[in-house]
Amino acid sequence: MPFCLGIDTSNYTTSTALFDTDTMEVVHSKKLLPVKEGELGLRQSDAVFHHTKQLPEMIKQLFDGREADISCIGVSVKPRNIEGSYMPCFLCGEGLADSLGAVNKIPVHKTSHQTGHILAALLSAGKLEFVNRKFIAFHVSGGTTDCLLVEPHKDNVIKITEIGTSLDLKAGQAVDRVGLMLGLKFPCGKELEKLAEQSSRSFKIKPVLKGGSCCLSGLENKCRLMLDSGESREDTANYCLSCIYAAVKGMTEYALLNEGDMPVVFAGGVMSDKIIRRRLEQDFEAYFAEPDFSCDNASGTAVFAAITEKFI
């Protein structure tokens, strides 16, 4: 039975995964990079340092008590499959993948972090057959708020074309900035969701859209004004997530109007939010990764290698 090893060293998570191509099951071993309390992120030099320390630990955990004959490796080497896309933190995973491939004489297949997110979402949703058709995908995280047209591609498994993006603040940045405003711990997504669920307010929000792209910087200012005027932390959290939902809904409607009716797949850490998910599922033919597959993980890179090797 072919097993595929996946590696992903994003800006905030050291992740490894083992994909069984017979059972289509995947196991993860991943760990967030440490961020000091009150800070919004890491410098790339610090991210590289922490990945270098954490990768051996993650590999050890992944194979603890488990035997697997690894046939290939998939690894993310850049944020997106576009020219000039680069972050030093991905060198950590790429270096380990190249070393393991050379020692074990097995192929190493390199892709983007964004491709990994989309394939992880398809695996989690039970829709891997979508790689053979067109669909809309969203990648919504700390670094991206992208609406994408995804099509089959001979060499890269899927071809990704941007339809829209955030022209200023990214959705994940908004979540974390508002979360820190509310005294939450970074990354703030899960705690912000818990706060918002305690709010009974209903907000009618008109998103700021320019074509298929959105602008989100205004929601941070509005949340600050809400808090300063004495509105509750719960309502402020609800407003933040409602703004993100409204923006994503508007971008989706634009994409479907211009590209035609097709399924929509939502990936990325922000899309693990239950409040946003419930609303989008009512609006569209929507497919979501489960939370463990929404946040940065290596399962998608392992799937990429499996498809490239024609194991699935």
Image (cartoon, helix red, strand yellow):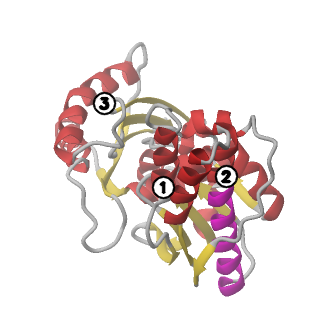
Q: Nearer the viewer, residue 179 or 290?
A: 179
Residue 25 x, y percent position in the rendering? 58, 35
CA distance separating discs 2 and 1: 41 Å
Residue 172 tag number: none
* Residue 47 found in image quarter: top left
Q: From what the image shows, is residue 130 above or below residue 236?
A: below
| Residue type at numbered disc 3 | Lys
Q: Are marks 2 and 1 in contact (CB under 8 Å)?
A: no
Give the class, few, some or many, for how many residues have Cα within 10 Å of label 3's Cα (few <14, many ≥20). Answer: few
State the predominant SS element of the stretch in magenta. helix
Left/right placement of residue 308 relative to residue 178 reads left
Residue 108 x, y percent position in the rendering? 28, 50
The residue wearing badge 1 is 307
**Residue extending furthest toward the front:** 229
| Residue type at numbered disc 2 | Tyr
Q: Nearer the viewer, residue 161 or 213?
A: 213
Left/right placement of residue 201 relative to residue 121 reads right
Residue 239 tag number: 2
Identity of the residue drawn at 77% across and 63% down: 204
Q: Nearer the viewer, residue 263 or 73?
A: 263
For the image shown, how many numbered marks are present on the structure?
Answer: 3
Give the class, few, some or many, for how many residues have Cα within 10 Å of label 1's Cα (few <14, many ≥20). Answer: some
Q: Which portion, as a residue range, is magenta?
A: 242-259
The residue wearing badge 3 is 36
Secondary structure under tag 2 reads: helix
Asked if residue 29 shows in the view, the reply is yes
Left/right placement of residue 100 relative to residue 191 reads left
| Residue type at numbered disc 1 | Ile
Q: Earlier in the sequence, mark 2 or mark 1?
A: 2
